[in-house]
Amino acid sequence: MGSAGHPVQITFWRADWQASVNGRKDDIHSLYPNASVDHYPFQAHSLEPGSAAQKEMMQRYAPAQAMGNRRVGPREFPVEAMMAEGPGTLSPGAGLLARGAGVRTKTGWQVVLVRKAPAGLSAKVRTQVAFAIWEGSAQEVGSRKMRTGWIPLALREAK
């Protein structure tokens, strides 16, 4: 996650974001097919879809969405660019413009990430790169993940 004065640029892809981009509905039954829900007030049949009353109820009973949490709701892209200068400093990477997509295979996921090279990176400058992978089925969340150490990265000049 970097350290004070030594920021890192992070390109982040998630399988659930990919499913949303691919068309999976963003509702409790699609996200958790075995869940049993009695009632969500903002989905009451008496509320007209899109009405002010429904929007007010949605803000009350879906607070993450109401607060603008970027981790909820349907997504346009399954990738996000972020910056960090140490634990607890993760923030949006404005202007980093990362894109990518993942495809489910028989053995896991194949993911391609595309982004601008960090400022100052060239064939004459050496830097480092690291990777982290969370496997949800292995209860890996938050700081519990598989990660590499720093790996030297050297670019070649285009010919």
Image (cartoon, rainbow, N blue to C red):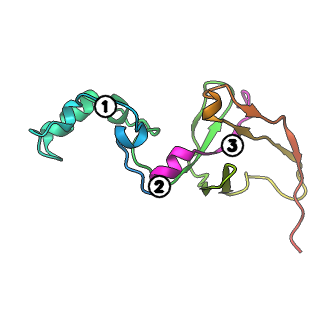
- From the top left corner, tell me how far across and down residue 155 is, in percent: 87, 58
What amino acid type should be assigned to the residue bearing mark 1?
Ala
Mark 3 vs mark 2: give the one in front. 2
Q: CA distance from mark 1 to mark 3?
A: 30 Å
Q: Is residue 8 magenta?
A: yes
Give the number of the disc on residue 62: 1
Name which of mark 1 and mark 3 comes first in the sequence.
3
Q: Quadrant of residue 2?
A: top right
What amino acid type should be assigned to the residue bearing mark 3?
Gln
Name which of mark 3 and mark 2 comes first in the sequence.
3
Q: Is residue 93 left or right of residue 148?
A: left
- From the top left corner, tell me how far across and down residue 70 is, in percent: 45, 40
Instruction: Identify the residue position indicated by label 2 in the image.
Output: 21
Q: Residue at x 67, y 42 (%)?
A: 10
Pointers 1 and 3 in contact (C-beta within 8 Å) = no
Instruction: Identify the residue position indicated by label 3 in the image.
Output: 9
Give the number of the disc on residue 72: none
Q: Quadrant of the N terminus?
A: top right
Closest to the observer: 23 or 157? 23
